[in-house]
Amino acid sequence: MIISRTPYRVSFAGGGTDLPAFYREEPGAVLSVAIRKHVHVTVHQRFEPNTRVAYSRTETVEDFRHLEHELVREAIRLTGVRDHLEVTTIGDVPAGTGMGSSSSLTAGLLTALYAYRGRVVSPAQIAREACRIEIDVLGKPIGKQDQYAAAFGGLNLIHFQPDETVQVEPVVCRPATLRKLERRILMVYTGRTRSADNILRTQSAATAINRSLLRQMRELALAMRDCLTGQADLEQFAALLHEGWMLKRSQGCGISDSAIDNWYETARKAGAEGGKLLGAGGGGFLLLMAAPQKHAAILQALGNPRTLDFAIEPQGSHCLFVDQFAAPAAVQRTIRPIHSYLQLAEV
């Protein structure tokens, strides 16, 4: 049995510049952080001559190519696993909440399936192949930030180049700054989930019109990075977060609505310094920044909605467990390098 763990992500600024309609003309940049909420994938060789996949529903098929779960199907195809498998997926938060859940799942599937084959591949390869599955094979109208955030973990400024290359620049800042950032962030559930596909299609189609605005969002990502390094300025970070949200919602495209705007303004009046709706928009989690002592008043003003603890996850997609005795013989021969890699990754 193989168990992989892959983080979800929070994007602070630059969303939309990771879409091909933008970065193929000029570089994009997104400031993104992996959080300590995860999707777990288990992969196990199945005795019966079929493949079983358990998620919100259960599928059992004789040939993996008949799976309706397209991410599992294409990850199996790409990694070249041809054994009959038992695959399960468990997420800490539901899909459609703005934290890159589908890309985290894709990265976690690739990590687990490669480990099943006795291979440890780089975060860059996991991210590239997750993009290939979601964008090239399945035709999702999404960008590239989620796959790289899930594969690499940590706090990064991710650069997207016109030649399709991606550079992940770790944001180096003091541990005390990260702890202060964690304490100031409040993640509030709007009670809605949504598919981002239609919103992203509309945003992509409107890129030519909104290119100047997207350039401003890219520059905000760079400025917010600078707020966290050196002598950290979290008040300015929060102000830029607010500026980025106002820019993003000015795009229209279904990113916000009157109910979400009302939530945000209510939170601001109760002490929030900045914030944004996570993901493409339309629902999910509302991220707010405020002094910790003001969190209770903000939540009370919003009617005490459900919240999600915010903590930074330094590790990207990786294997938690590899059962060498239950693995096929071909996998057992290469299991020691995997264990050595895991021990180093956990130090």
Image (spheres, helix red, strand yellow):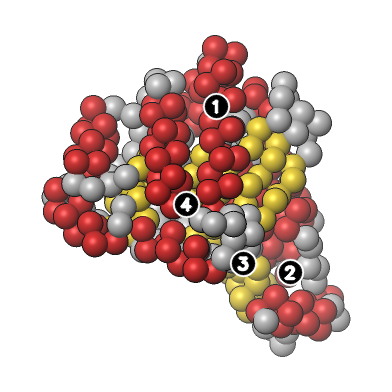
Q: Which amino acid does label 4 sit on?
A: Asp
The first of marks 2 and 1 along the sequence is 2
Question: Viewed as shown, does residue 332 lie left or right of 214?
Answer: right
The first of marks 1 and 3 along the sequence is 1
Q: In which quarter of the image is residue 52?
A: bottom right
**Residue carrying label 3:** 315
User: CB under 8 Å between callouts 4 and 1?
Assistant: no
Callout 1 crowding tier (Cα within 10 Å): few <14, some 14–19, many ≥20: some
The first of marks 2 and 3 along the sequence is 2
Q: Give me the C-alpha separation between circle 1 and circle 3.
A: 30 Å
Q: Which amino acid does label 2 sit on?
A: Ala
Q: Give me the C-alpha separation between circle 4 and circle 3.
A: 25 Å
Q: Give me the C-alpha separation between circle 2 and circle 3.
A: 17 Å
Q: Residue 91 carries which label?
A: none
User: CB under 8 Å between callouts 4 and 3?
Assistant: no
Q: Is mark 1 on a helix, strand or loop?
A: helix
Q: What element carries label 3?
A: loop
* Residue 111 visible here: yes
Please tell me whether mark 2 or mark 3 is closer to you in this view.
3
**Residue carrying label 1:** 216
The first of marks 2 and 4 along the sequence is 2
Determine the residue located farthest toward the top in the rendered image. 209
Q: Give percent across and percent down for residue 71.
A: 60, 48
